[in-house]
Image (cartoon, coloured by chain):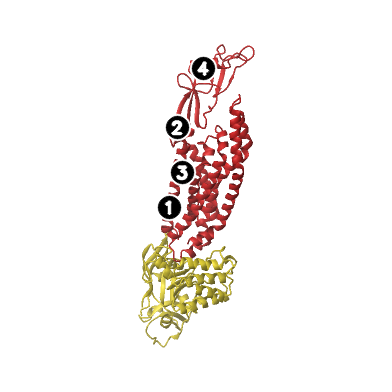
Chain colours: A yellow, B red
Amino acid sequence: MTAVLQAQDLGKRYGRRWALTDCTLDIPAGHVVGLVGPNGAGKTTLLNLASGQIAPTSGSITVLGGRPPASPAQLATVGYVAQDTPTYAGLSIADHLKLGARLNPGWDDALARERISRLGLDPARRAGKLSGGQRAQLALTLGIAKRPELLILDEPVAALDPLARREFLQGLMEAAAEHELSVVLSSHLVSDLERVCDYLIVLVDSRVRLSGEVDHLLATHHRLTGPRRDPDRLPADQQVISASHTDRQTTLIIRTDTPIHDPAWTVSQLGLEDLVLAYMSQPAAAGRRPALEVQR
Amino acid sequence: MMWLTWRQFRAGAAMMSAALAVLALILALTGPGLADDYSTGIAACATQSGGCSNFVQQFRHDNQGFFLGLTAVVLLLPAVVGLFWGAPLIARELEAGTHRLVWNQTITRTRWLAVKLGLTGLAAVTAAGLASLAVTWWSSPIDKAAAFEFPRPGPVLFDARGIVPIGYSAFAFALGVTVGMLVRRTLPAMAITLAVFVAVQIAMPLVVRPHLLPPTRSTLEITDSNLDGISAPRDGGPIRAVLQTPELPGAWVLSSRGVDASGQTVREILLSSSGACAPPRQGRPEDGLTACFAEMKQLGYRQQVTYQPASRFWPFQWYETGIYTALALGLAGFCFWWIRRRLS
């Protein structure tokens, strides 16, 4: 399977601050990739690097086999819906579609018009007069009708109300399925991504903490509950992600590829949200450990 | 990209075209009449005894308001272009975030900038060129009449005639774009552009233009044309003569000073109260001040003048247009470098 995005020791520094460090990723094509992390974790930086908006300080990144900053051929294969879904306030929807048609050789005008009419938007309306949800839909339409192989969306639903969120993500999923798009979208809310993603990257403090297919991640992480004990005495193949203790009881979230046989533990399944939160709330000291990669 | 640039620019272009059309219409209606008045007036006064100085003064006075207004229009146009076309060109995109929309279409940002700079910049220099052409044509009779007050190579008229407004406009536009790109916000970019442009426009005639070509120096005898006045105190002290800037037709006088026989600068010329310059006991002397001038000459007093003659108007126009165009191109080059390397 070809890689849609490969990064090797990728890093980006602004002044003295590293916005992204030691980022090594290999995302296969055909996935809807969720990029989660708290605000300021480096999500936008990673996506900007992937779309070629900025150049890396260290390491390298390859998107669809090409290096992002940015020949027209490379630009044509990657669609990017930037944070806050910017549009030209003074231009009408029809103008935006014309802009897309003029600036993209692969533009699918029928698709764009069909999407706009399905959304019930008046093409003569100015983008400045649209609601946040409608504006996001317009930006998404521009991204899709460009007919890219990879569509990147940076916090596309952050400013939307729950209903608009669902409509937006639904539209995105339909388009991804219909046009066999690979999609990377970021959010600081796991609940947004849970419904749509089959691949997950967790970014905390400008480092990749976790990346892998959602099914596989869920299958290899467990919550263990049992009498209080020291997590250091677990078997070597069980890696502790988080531990909490009361006087009598210990709750662990662990990662392991092998079954758990210890009868003292009650083993329960972990939801995606709990899994991500466990990684996000890991103490900074744990972050020194090399980033985890799912072996496949 | 041409389409998008035009779509974003068309309101500004329409406004500028309308303003220029109104200007052209007014000038076309009044210009021929003005030129006629001047040529018939000059023809009539040439045969009169008093010469043309009265007519020229009257003519200048009658048309002064409109003349200065038009000159101001051409002086301001480059600033307007820099402020309202240059500064917002990139800053508005960066401010609204729309650069992230347009840079992710299938177009490199270098090409995006090239088309925006090229089209809008072309409009900027065209507008300035047309306005200057029309105003230069319209004002040519008044320029002749006002040659002493406003010498053509001097600070005011030079900047609003001929081809330099094209250079100014290109520079102001490129300056606005560059500042907008660096500051990333429209309003501060406009303010900074205005401040820098005004500073450059003031510095140019004060500091640079006088030295574009080495100024001509000449030494003049003291005559009616450069003597401001003579005063003789009642109590019989020495007589004082004060000099003024001489009238050199159309020349831009940079400095003038009186010097004595040893070459020292003198602020006023002191003369003996018993010599030729002493006031006559009754009435005016018949030969005017001829004897007095002769005495000053004999004592070695004269006036040294440094000036740029009127004939240097066009060489200066070419030099200055070249300087401003080079500055504009340098700024544009910087913009391309910045948008590729530094901007995200």
Q: Nearer the viewer, mark 1 or mark 2?
A: 2
The CA span between labels 2 and 4 is 27 Å
Identify the disc placed on residue B334. Answer: 1
Comparing A291 with B181, the one in front is B181
Which of marks 3 and 4 precedes in the sequence?
4
The CA span between labels 1 and 4 is 60 Å
Asked whether the beta carbons under mark 1 and mark 4 sit within 8 Å of each other, the answer is no
x and y percent of residue A142 in the render?
50, 70
Comparing B289 with A191, the one in front is B289
Q: Is residue A206 visible?
A: no
User: Label 4's element?
Assistant: helix
* Chain letter for the residue marked with disc 4 in the picture: B
* Chain letter for the residue marked with disc 1 in the picture: B
The residue indicated by pointer 3 is: B321
The CA span between labels 4 and 3 is 45 Å
Q: Quadrant of residue A233?
A: bottom left
Could you confirm whether marks 1 and 4 are on the same chain?
Answer: yes
Which of marks 4 and 2 precedes in the sequence?
2
The residue indicated by pointer 2 is: B215
User: Label 1's element?
Assistant: helix
Q: Nearer the viewer, mark 2 or mark 3?
A: 3
Q: Is residue B102 visible?
A: yes
x and y percent of residue B290 in the render?
55, 16
> Label 1 is placed on what type of residue?
Phe
The CA span between labels 3 and 1 is 20 Å
Comparing A295 with B267, the one in front is B267
The residue indicated by pointer 4 is: B296
* Chain letter for the residue marked with disc 2 in the picture: B
* Chain letter for the residue marked with disc 3 in the picture: B
The CA span between labels 2 and 3 is 19 Å
